[in-house]
Image (cartoon, rainbow, N blue to C red):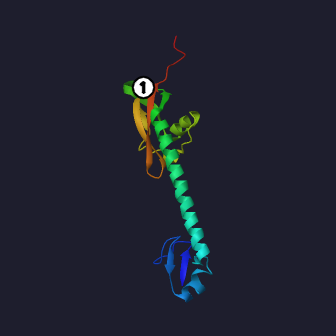
Amino acid sequence: MEIILREDVDKLGASGDVVEVADGYARNYLIPRGYALRATESEKKRLRHEIEKAKERKAEKTEQAQKLKAQLEDERFIFPVKAGEEGKLFGSVTTKDIGEEAAEEGYDIDKRNIALEDNIKELGVHKVPVKLFDDIYANLIIEVVEAKEEDEE
């Protein structure tokens, strides 16, 4: 019997695959448990339509991610922080700080997508990669500057 898998099944196939299995296996196990559907012409047509829609959505998201990448790489995020001698910071700039600053600038970046190996602990310009979609990364330019003290007399 020809079936369409609704879920990944070990040693049989992945979700969306059309496979040939024994009639009893399909009728008594796969179909009743919701792992598969009979591969009728209407189900095959629906599956092809879903695959086409998924490709369109992915292409659209890829295009949006490319546009966002171009915008982010033109942007410079400035962090005024207190620093001691030799440019060492009192504290550090974290993924949370970068995410919040990006949000203030109008960008929706999840801090979990910011690939910062270790918190930034020195003054200067740093490039920080951010995952936007699948394999599309943007390099944020983070400029950490010493905060000016307003209470100096």
Q: Nearer the viewer, residue 59 or 116?
A: 59
Rendered location of residue 145, percent (x, y)? 45, 26
In this picture, is 102 found above or below 147? below
Rendered location of residue 3, percent (x, y)? 55, 79
Q: Quadrant of the N terminus?
A: bottom right
Q: Residue at x 40, y 31 (%)?
A: 125
Q: Residue at x 40, y 37 (%)?
A: 127
The amino acid type of the residue labelled 1 equals Gly
In this picture, is 47 found above or below 116? below
Residue 24, picture quadrant: bottom right
Rendered location of residue 123, percent (x, y)? 41, 29
Q: Residues within 10 Å of mark 1 (few under 14, many from 20)?
A: few
Report the label total.
1
Residue situated furthest left in the rendering: 86
Residue 100, picture quadrant: top right
In this picture, is 15 found above or below 124? below
| 13 with respect to 36 (left or right) | left
Residue situated furthest bottom in the rendering: 24
Q: To which residue does mark 1 refer? A: 84
Rendered location of residue 81, percent (x, y)? 49, 28
Q: Nearer the viewer, residue 145 or 12?
A: 12
Residue 23, picture quadrant: bottom right
- Name the element at disc 1: loop
Q: Nearer the viewer, residue 71 or 102?
A: 71
In this picture, is 153 found above or below 47? above
